[in-house]
Amino acid sequence: MTAYTPPRRPPPPAGGSDFARLSKKIAEDDALPAITTVPTATLVLALLEGSPHTGPWTLRWTSAGHPPPLLLAQDGQAQYLEAGQGLLLGAGSSTVGSRPNAAQSLPPGSTLLLYTDGLIEIPGSDLDTGLTRLRHHALALAHEPLDTLCDQLLDRMPPGNTDDVALLAQRMPP
């Protein structure tokens, strides 16, 4: 999918045209079946903008059915960034051209977590339980170095999960 993404260009502020073009290109080129055995997939297209010297940092993103990013502020607050959510890739041609975009300022020292559903899906539980569990553990680990934060979040996953897990953490400069 990287081949279809414009280099270093954020999603536009409204309308989702870059993401719509990416979704359409994937559908036209039959790329989705080439990367997965299922007819749908989730995806986050995100750009982190800012400068370590001047700040402020802003996350611009759009999501195709992917779990929401989790923002951990230095003041002990955690917020799921639920804007920018759209339907899964492959959910039908009616989704092309209708991808929402979102933007969020990221406070100095905050930590942003992007993750796959394997981190929050717990066999026999609803999704809200997994999201609550992730928020609880992430807040408890928020001031740890990023490698420790990620390792500990993975170590605290309930047993029995058979889904793959990917986790990306980024801390904003103070």
Image (cartoon, grey):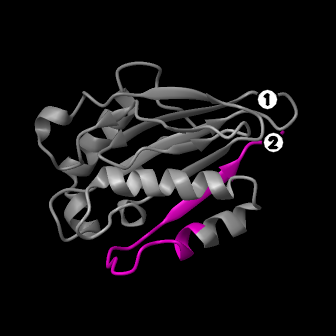
Most distant residue in the right direction: 53
**Viewer-nearest residue: 68 or 15:** 68
The stretch drawn in magenta includes residue 67: no
Quadrant that contains the N terminus = bottom left
Which residue corresponds to the image point at 52% horizontal and 27% vertical from the top-left?
Answer: 103
Q: Position of residue 99 (x, y in %)?
A: 30, 31
User: Real-space Cα distance between discs 1 and 2?
Assistant: 9 Å
Residue 154 is inside the magenta segment: yes
Q: Are there few (<14), some (14-19), or many (20+) residues within 10 Å of tag 1?
A: some
Residue 91 is situated, as x and y percent measured from the top left of the image, at 15, 46
Task: Say whether residue 78 is left or right of residue 23.
Answer: right
Asked if the residue under mark 2 is in contact with the one under mark 1, i.e. CB atoms within 8 Å, the reply is: yes
- Tag shown at residue 55: 1
Q: Nearer the viewer, residue 128 or 71?
A: 128
Residue 2 visible: no
Residue at left offset 21%, top offset 34%: 96
Which of 39 and 79 lies nearest the eye of the viewer? 79
Q: Nearer the viewer, mark 1 or mark 2?
A: 2
Disc number at residue 173?
A: 2
- Image quadrant where residue 52 sits: top right
**For numbered disc 1, what is the local secondary structure?**
loop
Precedes in sequence: disc 1 or disc 2 = 1
- Locate residue 60 relative to residue 39 in the image: left or right: right
Q: Is residue 60 left or right of residue 125?
A: right
Task: Using the image as rendered, state which of residue 42 and residue 165 is in the foreground.
Answer: 165
- Start-end of magenta stretch: 153-174
Q: Secondary structure at mark 2?
A: loop
